[in-house]
Image: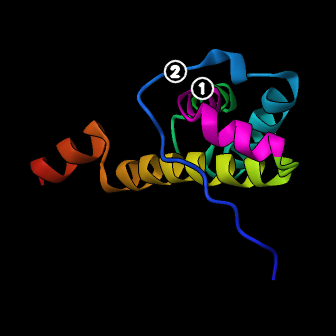
Amino acid sequence: MAPTTEYPAADTTIDWSVITPLVEEKARQAAAHCAEQYGKQTLLDRDDLFQEALILCAGNAERVRGYLSAGEVNHLYVWLRGKIQDKARTEYQRASRSISYEVAVEAWSE
């Protein structure tokens, strides 16, 4: 079993210096994955999810640095994908519970 590395919880500071080309690449990959999975069912597109991933990285700079310094770049990708998947899933569930105006008017007029 591989050793686990504990990372500090997110702090309230935003550190954009953590956004390196490698971090940006992993954020793009995670956003692309989630856009493929949920993009057609939600209003979130790849660019929105990419921005969300960058904000997550900047808001969790210590965690991102921990992944990078430990050589766990794939763990960074998995963490990002999970976080933005949660957001996309929430948006999908919210959208699937709502109905369009036209459907509501039609149902009301019957």
Where are the magenta residues, as a range? Answer: 53-69
Q: Position of residue 15 (x, y in %)?
A: 59, 19
Residue at 77%, 55% (x, y): give it. 75
Taking 22 as reference, is 95 above or below it?
Answer: below
Residue at 72%, 44% (x, y): give it. 66
Nearer the observer, 68 or 40: 68
Numbered circle sitting on residue 2: none
Nearer the observer, 26 or 11: 11
Taking 23 as reference, is 9 above or below it?
Answer: below
Query: Is 64 left, or right, of 94 in this rendering?
Result: right
Nearer the observer, 35 or 79: 79
Q: Residue furthest bottom?
A: 1
Q: Is residue 61 magenta?
A: yes
Nearer the observer, 54 or 89: 54
Of the two numbered discs 2 and 1 on the same chain, state the one appearing first in sequence. 2
Residue at 74%, 47% (x, y): give it. 76
Q: Position of residue 73 (x, y in %)?
A: 84, 47
Residue type at numbered disc 2:
Ile
Residue type at numbered disc 1:
Ala
Which quarter shows the C terminus?
bottom left
Q: Which residue is mark 1?
A: 58
Q: Position of residue 97 (x, y in %)?
A: 32, 56
Query: Is 36 left, or right, of 108 in this rendering?
Result: right
Q: Position of residue 33 (x, y in %)?
A: 75, 48
Q: Which residue is mark 2?
A: 14
Q: Is residue 95 magenta?
A: no
Q: Secondary structure at mark 2?
A: loop
Residue at 53%, 29% (x, y): give it. 59
Cβ–Cβ under 8 Å for marks 2 and 1: yes
Taking 17 as reference, is 71 above or below it?
Answer: below
Q: Secondary structure at mark 1?
A: helix
Q: Residue furthest left?
A: 109
